[in-house]
Amino acid sequence: MWRCGRCSPGARIVWRRRRSQASRQLLPLYGQNVDLKLMSTDMTSVRNLGVSTFSSRWYKVSIVGLSTAHPSVACNLKTCKRECHTAPIDPLDVHKQKLKLWFSHLPQEEKQFGGSFSPETMHIDPLILERHPAEDKPGPFYTHQNKGVSTTVEELFQTTLNTGDQGVNILLYGAVGSGKSTVVRKLVLDWCSGSSLSQFQLLVPFSCEDLSQMSKSISLRDLVARKYVHLRKTPLLSGELHQAKNVLFVFNGMERMKLDFRMASTELCSDPNEALPPGAIVVNLLRNYLLPEASILVTTRLSALERVPQKYVARYAQICGFNDPARQRAYFTSRLLQQTGRESRKDELIELFYLNLRQESQLAAACYLPSYCWLTCATLHFLHFTDDKAPIRTLTGIYTSFLRLNFGGEVLDTGGGLSSQDPQKTSLMLYVVQTVGKLAFDGVTKKRASFSEDELEQWIGGKTKTDEELQKLAMFRTDVLDFFLVPCVESKRLYDSAQIDAKRYVFAVPAMQEYLAALYVVLGENKTALEKLTKQVSDSIGKPDEDVTTLFSILSKFIPFKIFAVFNLLKLFPSFLEKISRHSKGHIARTMAAEMFRSEDSYNEDVLDQVEQSLLGVHGPLPERPLDKRSFELYPIFMGGLLHYGNRRLLDQLGCSIKSESVSQITRSLKKQLIRESGKKQPPEEMMDLLTLLYEFQNPRVTAEVLQSIQAIDLSTVRMTPLKCFVLSAVLSCCAPGFLLNDLILSSCHLTQDLLHLLWPAFRHTRGLNLQFNLLGPESCTLLRDLLLEPNCTIRSLQLCDNNLLDTGVGTLLDSLPENQSLQNLSLMHTGLGDSAALQLAEGLGKQTGLLELNVAYNSIGDSAAVTLVDACREHPTIHTVHLYLNQLTDVGKQSLYNLQQGGSGRHVRVLASVMEGSDISEDWHPILSVIGKNSVSWERERVREQLLVFLRDLEWGRQQQQSLWKRLHFRRVESGVRQTLLLLEKASSIGSGNSGR
């Protein structure tokens, strides 16, 4: 901002003439008084730069574009007399700018949705109903009911401010995660922009969590000045001339404060300059005794409604969240569409999610709360938009951040209320783990996902005895329990139709049960009786303080050694406890490994697909499964993720501390368990789950040691997504550059060109790369060519069968052959290869010396190109096998290949072109039929059928030429194999046509 010389020595603006130019230039002169003349011929350039005419030869310089908060400049350049007219700074304008900056700040968790993400683009108005709490008393397992008049906060004040000079108190209440803080943020930003609550000149927001930290007395004006220094002298808070009528106070999160409206506890005070405890200030404001003309908006949770007497509240309103799928869809659209690129995928995700919401699924019930909408959206974003450019995120981290956003820093106060002032009070999140987490752990152990009311009563507060514990439980039931556990939608339908006797309850999001169960175990809450006893004894005598230690050292000089030996036993006790502790931590690791490699879950879908299906639903026939039974494969993965330092740091903010020593002990034991289990051959889905566990663990050293025991990673038939590709690459990148897998099998994984880029780091850690039966096109060959051209390329086997590479793609790939010497096995079967690419391959073989086997079967290679290719292979120093069956070969071409093998110069090469070689059966008839049988369902069935009929015709002709009975029987055997393959092909065709008919 420009200022004149008196206001700022760094912004004196004058005109000076350059000696070498006729034009004038605006220059800053620092600390100089200059008397300059401007030629009248420069009026055009002067006007263009914002200088207005003062006279024909002198000009008044006016700096344009200044805000009202900054002084204007008026300089008479004739006499160099500067007159600085400083406009008064409006503190209310400064206040609006400061509030806008502060409330526009978003948590780090919100920035994952895109750079253009802001409160304006993200906000979706929740449903707000005006109703008195007594009309619909909330309780445990409160079900949302839309009873009341829909309204907005602005409407509540507009229809109430006509009551006279006294201000209006409005209490806005809602459950945990219903969007109270978000509504306040949007309200403040709208007031700053002038689009809402324009009847108030001043809006002063306070965080009750912040006020609860203040222990010293302070006056209202000093409190406002302490939080907003620019409002120190504002007359609106002086208490004179009813100026406070234009003031609105906002207190967010009243449940964090202890408010006592009894006269004996909180005295009356109407002086805004008198020092009072912060709670007393709030009470007197709500009494309309201090600044009675001011209006007040209070937000609170359900359990704190009765803390403010009804006579001090003019109107009640409840935030009910998103009551219909349209609001939920708008919420998801505002976040997922912030991500640039992949628009078609984003639209598809939103449509699938909206379809699941409209089906009145369990997810729709959970997304009634905006917090669960955030969790669902963050999970979908993690599953579908993770790439190598985004910051590292984990599923465990998302759930930990979700709990921190909703319960960060809160403790249960037995005196009534949630506070974070006394470190000795019970952490709210720890209380959740000890109650709801215990229930979740019992469900995971018994493979149950739903619970009856009796079971909830048993596990949550069933053993409470004291009044303090009962008070904690009552507050917990009202505020928190309904946040985690909701009525089961399916059981409600069965209960309404009298098919079951009682309603059942489930976790709002299925993965939350596994997360809380994992947290319950990692925190050591599932201790045995011996472990609990030894911990208590350790706390009492195992860790003596300095005074006791000093006393023992003094007594040791006077007490006989034999007697003092008894005291020395106390020093041995901690080592005994340490052994028990190590055994406990080893038990946690063994539990993780046992849950990770359960045989009954071996052929389930991988956990990432299971999480996606829980959000987007299953489209098709559902598997038959009891209502309360399901697999819990995320449970051990969450246990590993909770050991990561980042998650432990967030949990420490929640009052759930996981000690580094415990993590070290669990990690050592877990590493041994994983190394032993990973050395065994695992199904592809289990291997993907293991990689996910290592990724969530985020421990590169342990990951590298576990991978040393794995020879091959088989992920065939696993539906690879950007996240899974990123997980695979991230895990393998933890290994040393010299670590190599024997095989990386990614066949039938729905791989595309974009996914290959994410897999590039993984390709550097394998000798064999299997990419067959994917969705790769000609463009993908550019990346594969660059991979083969790397100086330290380690790829020995490259399988590209059943990818539509065509001649252009294969030609690009073959450009790497002259410079690559590591490749030994190249499979281009069924890739759309034609004569031109076959001839190019024949030409390139002369410059490559390491190839051993070449597979170009099931393509469109003709006779001439096939003969040329085989001839080049015979000249090659190392190639011993060429696959040419199912190509466009005639009988003449097959005979030419046979003659080429029998005579001529060059090495002998094994050529697999047909089940016949001349008039005899080929030695390789069995591998040919085996390959055709395995792939006949996925290949073009009519073409395969024609080739099999040609094989039958050749076999019948060859059998007729044979005189030996044994040879004829051998021909019959091969014919039987061909007919069996034909029969399988016809069955597959009939099943496919039947499904298409349906």
Image (tube, helix red, strand yellow):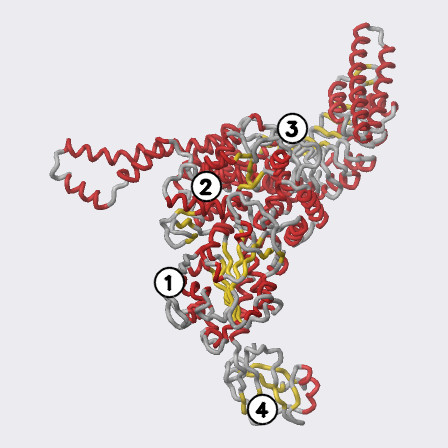
Compute the Cα span from label 2 to label 3.
32 Å
Amino acid beneath label 2? Val
Q: Amino acid at mark 1?
A: Met
Is there CB contact under 8 Å for labels 4 and 1?
no
Tag 3: amino acid: Glu
Labelled disc at residue 263: 1
| Pointer 4 with pointer 3, Cβ within 8 A | no
Residue position for label 3: 624
Mark 4 and mark 2: span between their CA atoms? Answer: 74 Å
First along the sequence among labels 2 and 3? 2
Label 3, label 1: how many angstroms apart (C-alpha)? 64 Å
The mark tally for this picture is 4
- Which residue, as the protein is rendered here, is positioned at the far top? 965
Q: State the image coordinates of residue 595 (x, y, percent, origin top left).
A: 51, 30
x and y, in percent, of residue 359 in the image: 68, 41
Q: Choose the circle earlier in sequence order: 3 or 1.
A: 1
In this rendered view, identify the residue nearer to me: 460 or 822: 460
Would you identify the image quadrant in which residue 541 lies? top left
Badge nearest the viewer, 4 or 1: 1
